[in-house]
Image (cartoon, rainbow, N blue to C red):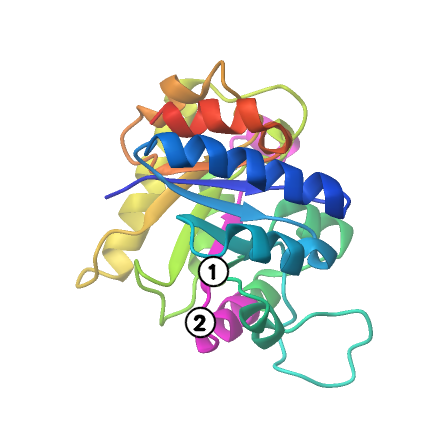
Amino acid sequence: MRPLIAGNWKMNTLRSEATALVAGLMEQRAERDPGCDMLVCPPFVTLRPVAEVIEGSPIALGAQDCHAEGSGAHTGDISAAMLADAGCKCVIVGHSERRADHRESDSLVVSKAIVAHENDLTAVICVGETLAQRESEETLSIVETQVSQSVPDGATAENTVVAYEPVWAIGTGLTPTIDQISEVHDYMRALLVARFPDRAEFRLLYGGSMNPGNAREILAVDNVNGGLVGGASLKVEDFWAICTSV
């Protein structure tokens, strides 16, 4: 399967910065196919400006979240239909920062994934353990629960990507060992194969302080099919280096 490198810009970039960032990526992409699919996920307010810059290019547009309902009285929220209308192909759901800051549960995450699918969006479903859970040797049980309860029954390899992001590694500069990453990704693959034996393989991304220095080694791990990149996705040279590491 073709790897996917996704950039989660989080609450960063004004319009001029966002459009300059994707323009720089498009210049690189025009000169070379890095051997992966590329996805950028800007903040809501820069989705349309970014969409206009990358229109017709191989770079896909995604959002960082959506509401679990299709429409209604939900002040400040954005629906999956609105995202699709803005040009999005994907949406991140269940990121650990949403789970922590907004107390999002697995049941809410799976509802968001379902509404994403209903609007022809690929759901990038995030799972991962905290440092306390890692130290208590609960990693696999936490991941199993989140994968089992956050991935909807209608998931396929075409409409769903699963991203493992150990919470303690996000934005800290810390990363799990290669053996730890391999253990979790192998376990997620086994869970998905057991539940969906008749469907093609899902892409499994690793996220959590992926950078140009460690990307090649991480992306070489079996069952790591790409990366969900945070801080390093905000610099053209860093994100492009990760893309070409595949």
Q: Nearer the viewer, residue 15 or 242?
A: 15
Q: Helix, strand, or loop for circle 2?
A: helix
Which image quarter holds the N terminus? top left
Real-space Cα distance between discs 2 and 1? 7 Å
Q: Which residue lies at the image location 55% right of the left edge and 23% below the top edge?
A: 238
Residue drawn at x 53%, y 62% is 88
Q: Earlier in the sequence, mark 2 or mark 1?
A: 2
Q: Identify the residue under disc 1.
A: 123
Residue 37 placement: quadrant? top left
Task: Answer whether labels 2 and 1 touch (C-beta < 8 Å).
Answer: yes
Residue 22: give its label.
Answer: none
> Residue 49's x, y, as percent?
66, 55
For mark 2, what is the residue?
117
* Range covered by the magenta-colored residues: 110-138
Residue sitting nearer the eye, 195 or 132: 195
Mark 1 residue element: strand
